Image: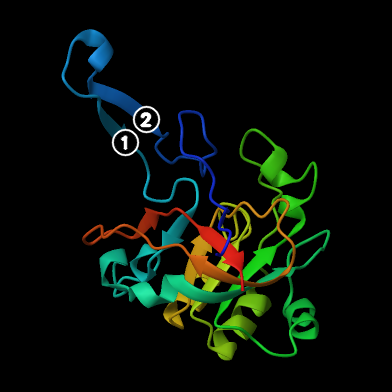
Amino acid sequence: MAQWIDISLPLCPGCRLWPGDRPFEHAFASRIADGAAYNTSMLACSAHVGTHVDAPCHVLAEGVSVDRLDPSIFMGEALVLEVQTADHITARQLDSALPTWPQRLLLKTRNSAPGGALDHGGFDPAYCALELDAAQLIARRGLKLLGIDYNSVEPYSKGSQVHKTLLSAGIVTLEGLDLRGIRPGAYQLVAVPLRLKDFDGSPVRALIAQA
């Protein structure tokens, strides 16, 4: 039986946010401790909190929403590729590391290294992401899904061209993965978003198992 590993970040008050996004909030509508028959929770948050999927309409005016994406995109073989660089990931680095390209690629970067961006409590604008030429190369390779180990595939304060390049090519982005302790290699991935009608993204529970 496959051993599934959780590579999603926990959602809780105080969890890491993209600057300006609504903080994750949890409250009880009813509590057994207060005499109610049930515990009933309520939550409020950005659709892009924690480990999440970006739908094309996140950055494309005519892009489809998350509920219209094919669920099969988020289930199947995936390759965890470790790319260590002091700056952002370039096309040259990816091309030299991938003699053959998978349908689903999960990038493990310096964000997942000990003391890296994932180990910092708050938002770290110096996180590792993709240079535009890397996104353009990925778009030409025809992937279904690209995942990365921080809040965004796009460098901080560099606009939205990386997102637009990937999503306009039909490549869904899976952001906020926790790949600390995960070895590079082939895995099975399950990371299906919620069926949120007309939403531009959705939190997910991302799981992998050795292929």
Tell me the kind of residue under disc 1: Ala
- From the image, which quarter does the N terminus lie in? bottom right
Which residue in the protein does label 1 denote? 44
Q: Quadrant of residue 57?
A: bottom left
In the image, is residue 97 above or below residue 173? below
Residue 59 in percent (x, y) is at 40, 66
Q: In which quarter of the image is residue 31?
A: top left
Q: Who is closer to the viewer here, 22 or 209?
A: 209
Q: Do the residues labelled 2 and 1 touch (CB within 8 Å)?
A: yes
Secondary element under disc 1, as helix, strand or loop, is strand
Q: Tell me if residue 45 can be seen.
A: yes
- From the image, which quarter does the C terminus lie in? bottom right
Q: Which of marks 2 and 1 is nearer the N terminus?
A: 2
Which residue in the protein does label 2 denote? 25
Q: Who is closer to the viewer here, 134 or 186?
A: 186
Q: Is the residue marked by circle 2 packed among few (<14), some (14-19), or many (20+) residues within 10 Å? A: some
In the image, is residue 35 above or below residue 26? above
